[in-house]
Amino acid sequence: MTANIKFVKHLQKSIFYNPLKNNELDTQELEIRRDPLTHVQSVFNPVLEDKVAMFYGSSDAALMEKMAAESEPRCFLCEDRWRAMTPTYPSDLVPGGRIQVGQAVLFPNIFPAGQIHAVIRVGQKHYVPLAEFDPVSVTEAFQAAFQFAECLSKDKSVQYLTINANYLGPAGASIAHPHFQIVGGDLPCTYLESVLNSSAAYHKSNGSCYWPDLVNVEKAAGERYIGASGPVEWLAAFSPQGANEVVGVFPKRSHFLEMTDADIKGLAAGIVNVLHGYADMGISTFNFSVYSGPMGEHDDTIRCFVRIISRQNVYENYRTDDYFLQKLLRNELIVITPEALASNLRLQFK
Ligand SMILES: [Zn+2]
């Protein structure tokens, strides 16, 4: 069966008298891209390519250090303060109430946004520039996450789980200390629900799973393929839903309970590679989500995957990167093309 994946680019022209060009008539050509699975749109205007600074100010390293130093003394993840300050699960669900793997600690979110909502401390250091994220502490955090998924398998109402991260204020984090969050329950989140439906429809009409097909097509084309970290395959999203979106696919795993140690180490290594690549690009913040099909039986219509995006950089009075285009029209703006992003990040996967 050959993969039936189409990368559609819709072209538009925008015409006006341009004061930057002596008030001559200017025609700017826009490219509207559609995600091959969900059809979500993103917009690229090549004129913006050398105007990155208009959208993303430079990261202010001194400001980040200063803010981190101010928040460290009251951080509940630093030292062993979490022992006194964080909640615990009933011990029939999680023996001992919390999960500890090396420096990683998993405990309930005190203000849950879902039936299941846990927080995981990533390493003991309060503030970590993206260039200094290390595979060991990220691996420990994911190991804690997947141990928690095992604990939750006793509760059959928990069908859907995601592992997520916000890093630093512009990405929505309320504390600097690196941490991940597991969110889930008996309903998939809105995005996952649409992906499950589209993936099932793809499987029905093509007789194959979209996700390994996507990897094969992108690997063969090469333009957006970045590399592999163990069993995980990484590529730049054709129609990104955030800045610098990278997608990692587990070609053989349909849900979190199928993950092996090699999968977990590959996931951590790949995320760290992307963060180091972001650091080289001057980026200081990120979000990611790791998605899973329903827990339990292997489901051949879906695979586990992760999406990682960068957010606005940290500087004083920064401008938000989400405006009406993203929040209300649900179109993303492409400032750096996915093809250029892939060529930047490929170096980290060598
Ligand atoms: Zn801390």
Image (cartoon, rainbow, N blue to C red):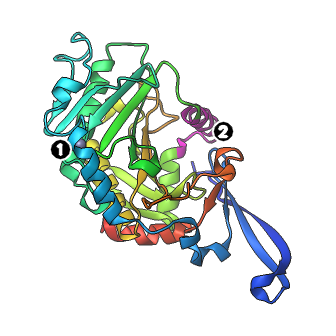
Which residue is at 25% across, 25% downward? 86
Compared with 183, 234 (above or below) is below
Q: Which residue is mark 2?
A: 205
Which residue is at 35% across, 61% downward? 63
Quarter assignment of residue 51: bottom right
Q: Examine the rendering and report whether any part of residue 273 can be seen.
A: no
Q: Examine the rendering and report whether any part of residue 329 can be seen.
A: yes
Q: CA distance from mark 2 to mark 1?
A: 48 Å
For residue 108, side relative to residue 302 (left or right): left
Compared with 10, 80 (above or below) is above
Say which mark, if any, is on residue 124.
Answer: 1
Report whether the residue tagged 1 is closer than 8 Å to ligand 1: no
Q: Earlier in the sequence, mark 2 or mark 1?
A: 1
Quarter assignment of residue 30: bottom right
For residue 333, side relative to residue 274 (left or right): right
Secondary structure beneath label 2: helix
For residue 4, side relative to residue 85 (left or right): right
Name which residue type carries label 2.
Ser
Q: Position of residue 12 (x, y in %)?
A: 80, 67
For residue 214, side relative to residue 148 (left or right): right
Q: Position of residue 198 (x, y in %)?
A: 62, 37
Secondary structure beneath label 1: loop
Ligand 1 - quadrant of the structure image: top left
The magenta segment: 191-210
* Residue closest to the eye, 311 or 148: 311
* Residue closest to the eye, 48 or 144: 48
